[in-house]
Each structure stands twice: as C-alpha cells, then as structure tokens.
Image (tube, rainbow, N blue to C red):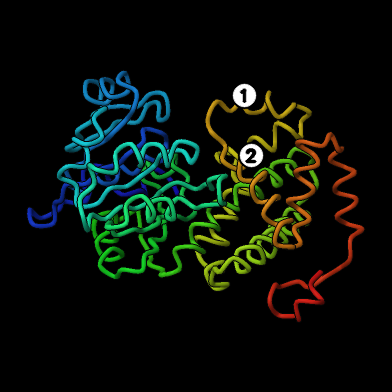
Amino acid sequence: MSQNNKPDQQGEKKANEQDRHHVAVLGGGSFGTAMVKVLAENGHTTHFWMRDARQVDEVAEQHCNSRYMPGIKLSGNIRPTSDLAEAIAQAEIVFVAIPSKAFRTVIVENAASFRDEQIVVSLTKGIEKEGFKLMSEILQSELPRARIGVLSGPNLASEIVNRDLTATVIAAKDPDVRRKVQQMLGCEYFRVYANVDMYGVELSGALKNIYAIVAGLAAALELGENAKAMLITRSLAEMSRFAVSLGANPMTFMGLAGVGDLVVTCTSPKSRNFRIGYAIGQGKKLDEAVAEIGQVAEGIYTLLLVKEKAEEIGIYMPLVKGLYEILYGNASIKAVINSLMMAVQNSDVEFILPRTLTH
C-alpha cells in the first residue's frame, strides 16, 4: 500500500471522552512501542513502563524510542516511567510485552501492584523453560485474581508503527476482556478479531518463530518458491499436530494467529527469526547471526524447549529436529534437507487421515 493510501495521521481516530481509558504497556521493545503508539493515537492515556531510565527520558523528552523504533514519532498522551507500580495503578488494561526469559521475574516482583479483576494481556510470544509454561499460564498462576488475555497474530511492529493495515487476535475466556481490547486497540488500520482458545493462539505465536528460522535458511539457499510453499505448509501441519496434542483447538491454526502469523514470519525479512535463519544459511554461526540482528529472536530458545517436549510426549516434528541438528549438532543444511525429502511421504493435512498414517 502506498503512503498516500494509508490512513492520514491528521485523520487518526478521535475517541469520545467516555471512550478514553487509562492503559499500561510493560516493556520498551519494538512491539511494546508499537502498541503504545496505537493506544495513544486512539486517545487513551498510555502508561509506558521501561526498565531503562534512559529510554524513559528519551520517550518523555524526544517522543521516540530510537533503539527499537528509530525515526518513529510517538504522539498522544504517553506517560513513560520506570516505576511499574505507577504505570499500572490506574490502568484498566495492562499489556505485557516483556521478553519470555524475564517475564515471570517481573510479574512476581510486582504482583502486589496489580488490582483484583484487572485485565492483563500478554503480548509475548515465548515459552518458559521450567514446566513448558506459556506466558498466560504464568499470569494465571502469579495473578490469580486478574482477568487474563493473549494478543497474537501476523503483527510486524515496523508495519504497525507506519500505520500499515494489520489484523490481530485477542484470545480470552472472558467476553468482556475480548470486547474491551477490541474497543481500545481497534482503529482504521488495526483490526482486532476474537478467539476463546487462549492456549492455541499463544502457542502458535511461539511455535511459528521456529519455522521462520527454517524459512530464512531456505531463502538464503535460494531453494525456490515451490520449496517455500512446501516448508510453510509442512510447518503448519507440524505445529498444529504438536499444539493439539497439548490441548489447543485445531481450528485456531486456520486463522490469523496460526497460518496468518506463520506466513508473515516465514516470508518477511522484517522478521527477526527469519533474519537469523537467513544469516545462518549464508554461513554464519548462530552466535554471529544473533549478534548481527541485535535483538531477541525468541525462536532460538523456543526450538530447544519444543524439541525436548516433542520427544517427551512422542510427537513427530522433523523440521524441529532438523533445525536443531543444524544449529546445535553441526549437521550440514543440505544433509538435513535431503533427509527430510527422503522421509516417509505422509498425510498432507493434519487430522484428516488416521493418526497412525501421518507418521
């Protein structure tokens, strides 16, 4: 879409007084910053918590977050702070965009600051190593009186801040949580769909990062468009097989949070995980690729956890196994690809043929 066809900055959504709310965003990375921009432009008082005092000062004084969103102006009623209790004190909804490795620590340290019945929505696509816990499960265990939701979908932060047309999914069991998140985030360029399958929406958002690395490898090797299509659809079959075995709804993978998120991260160089895979496909070591990207690529951590979990519960995941062998077992990319192509030709669409025939 050309810049001229995007919603006009001057014509941004004007919220009526009764539609304006206090909201909080925890985490000053790229996606947290993107959500702050959407919420503030929608007319909400947006409390923006960042651990780094220098980031807080920059947002307050220069209205930008140059480390994660260089060149992007943050406008509206944004209140940056390094005091988490202050950030969430008045917030009707708290959006948590903290990296998975620090997620529980931050929540535990500040659990007493959250109010009963406060809506807390995870934006983080990752898995905690201990017990294979998703972020919503951490919130449910540490904030048992909060109302929990998950936001996930094909949402590249760099496009959201440029007001490119984007859609996402809010998953929550409580219909009031779904409705309020839709009302607060929805605008002419950001559409919010609803789902009740929190586990499936969240797990698909974590799993797709693994396959984005695979897709980046394929792109670097110039395997061709047919191969890309094969890898994406086999990735969808593999991730849905794994997630459904853990209790997710298979239909979730047909929507934005499943195939939608998978497609965008497996085809876009804007995806950090895709770029990691591309760099490795060009011959870089994993550490070199990570240093080159300079930001957290959740797929690296998720790969280790999913491989271990798949082996524990006996789920067939050849792409996960193959990527693990490339990154950690010194296997050549071509050898892994050859082994995948020589494997048993199984079911195309998961859940159609009997389970015994899909392996």
Pinpoint residue 43: horizontal percent, then vertical percent. 17, 47
216 or 327, which is in the foreground? 327
Q: Which quadrant of the structure image shows residue 301? A: top right
Question: In terms of sequence position, does the residue under pointer 1 or pointer 2 come before the other?
Answer: 1
Compared to residue 67, the image places residue 296 above or below, namely below
Q: Residue shown at 73%/32% (left/top)?
A: 280
Residue 40 appears in the figure: no
Give the left or right position of residue 64, taking residue 21 as reference: right
Q: Which residue is mark 1?
A: 292
Left or right of 58? Residue 272 is: right
Compared with 261, 326 (above or below) is above
Image coordinates of residue 198 in percent, x first then y, are 44, 63
Q: Which mark is residue 300?
A: 2
User: Is residue 109 something that shows in the picture?
Assistant: yes
Q: Which residue occupies 75% across, 58% down?
A: 317
| Residue kind at label 2, given as amino acid type | Ile
